[in-house]
Image (cartoon, coloured by chain):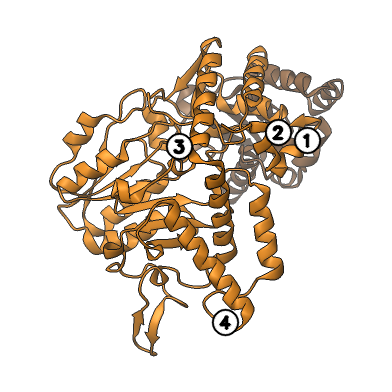
Amino acid sequence: MFLVDDIRKDFPVFSDLKDGKELVYLDTAASAQKPKCVIDKICEVYTHSYANVHRGTYALADEITKAYEDARQIIADFINAKTSSEIVFTRNATESINLVAASWGVENLKKGDTVLVSEAEHHANLVPWQIVAQKTGAELKIFKIDDNGAFNEEKFDQALTPDVKLVAVTAMSNVLGSVFPIKKITTRAHQIGAKVLIDACQAVVHQKMDVSDIDCDFLAFSGHKLYGPTGIGVLYAKSDILQTMPPYQTGGDMVDTVTYLKTTYAPAPARFEAGTPAAVQAIGLGEAVKYLLQIGFENIKSHEDNLISYFYQKAQKTQGLKIIGTAQDKGGVFAFDFNGIHPQDLAFVLAHENIAIRIGHHCAEPLVKRMGYNSLARASFGLYTSKNDIDAFFKALDKAKRFF
Amino acid sequence: METLESLIENFSFLESWEDKYQYLIDLGEHLEPLPDNLKTDAFKVAGCQSEVWLVPSCENKKFSFKADSDAIMVKGIISILLIIYDQKDLFEIKNIEVQKIFAKLGLEEHLSPSRRNGMLSMVEKIRFYAAQFEKNV
């Protein structure tokens, strides 16, 4: 266990007050606050170790190139990839998935093939497949989830027909918090010869991801949700697949030899990192991962489980509060309806209490509609979330009720 | 219907944000609802966090607007905008400094470009409609 008060001291933002009120940050599922070690690392690299990576022949360039490649190794170890060459740095998970869609998808999918996704996908794991389907003539199929947001094994098995060539699925819904059994999904998909892409954006923050154990073919996540900088994301792909994939973008640093008319490409991951990469951000992400590992994922998980049961306890005593997404296996993400008050109205009041929540369709418009809403409010937890935050949230709901 | 002057006066008596919000809600509750047959995609204002519909009309080169939303505070803001832009011509619509008026009301946060609640989209739509009408006359 860790003391949340100690953790909060690692995050400078919590010492800022707005109109005398402490920040109650319940929007970590959108983006996490940054610990001081990450902020310091970024500052340090820009101040003392900055040059372009992979290009220079002087000490500074060597230093940052080493730090960048070390960060790749940190990420590889973190998700238990076989080698660091299975890690491609991207801008974010959205770009990671687009990369797979545009490169692997366009190369390998054809008419008669199917891409299978769940009802609970973020637009980032839906729209790229719509585009690939249009381009290749492949079909996009959606498998249903339970009304409480839980993964439904039977419905998944029914949808997993022999024409499915790729299963692209979230490990944890950003709206409902439902955790999907990705290892089981991967095993089933592999039995019929389909590849598997995991959108681990939410899940990677809450639980240890082990790609060797899951055996997925692709896994994508963003740095900014993992307490790291913005502008950096990760694509993991199995080496044998990644090495056969055509380039996604072209330019500098991803080539082997170039003549005016013809180019041969560098092996992966360099082949997929055209142009100057977000090296400082990658190094910052490495620092964030080190920070999380130091705290320990068992501790993070048990802290979050405590918060979840505390939230449920408070919710039960709150009349008119309906939690959308009550799967047994759930992370700290609570979409909710409160007495039918419009999320926008609710957000106005909560913002004045310095409480940050997310409202709208959460980049998962079909899912929000499927749950019966046009817009939802969502409170989500991070490792710095305290019971005080949850108390403040419920107090503010009570206040909102008096308005509407 | 309130006038802009009476609104400014009423808001000036309200010191706490709670009182201002309550007044916005009251305004929202009194906003004449838009008939359902006008709540169509064609009249929807994109970029709002709530559903907003805006229907323009023009007589003798003077514009007026009807609007509605599924969020009550947004309806309150809408009723202020409708008062501000009621019976104005294109020139006036172009030149109204709506952010300054909202600042006077103590509601500037709602028209801040950094808040993606879409209130500014509504203003842009009003300007767009007015410009379109003018072109077609």
Can you tell which of label 3 and label 4 is closer to the viewer?
4
Tag 1, which secondary structure?
A: strand
Identify the residue under disc 1: A17
Asked if labels 1 and 3 share a chain, the reply is yes
Q: Which mark is residue A56?
A: 4
Tag 3, which secondary structure?
A: loop
Given the image, on which type of amino acid does mark 3 rest?
A: Asn
Mark 4 or mark 1: which comes first in sequence?
A: 1
- Cα distance in 3D space between marks 1 and 3: 28 Å
Asked if labels 4 and 1 share a chain, the reply is yes
Image vertical order of residue A20 relative to residue A223, above or below: above
Mark 4 or mark 2: which comes first in sequence?
A: 2
| Subunit under mark 1 | A
| Subunit under mark 2 | A
Q: Which chain is orange?
A: A
Q: Which mark is residue A23?
A: 2
Q: Which mark is residue A174?
A: 3
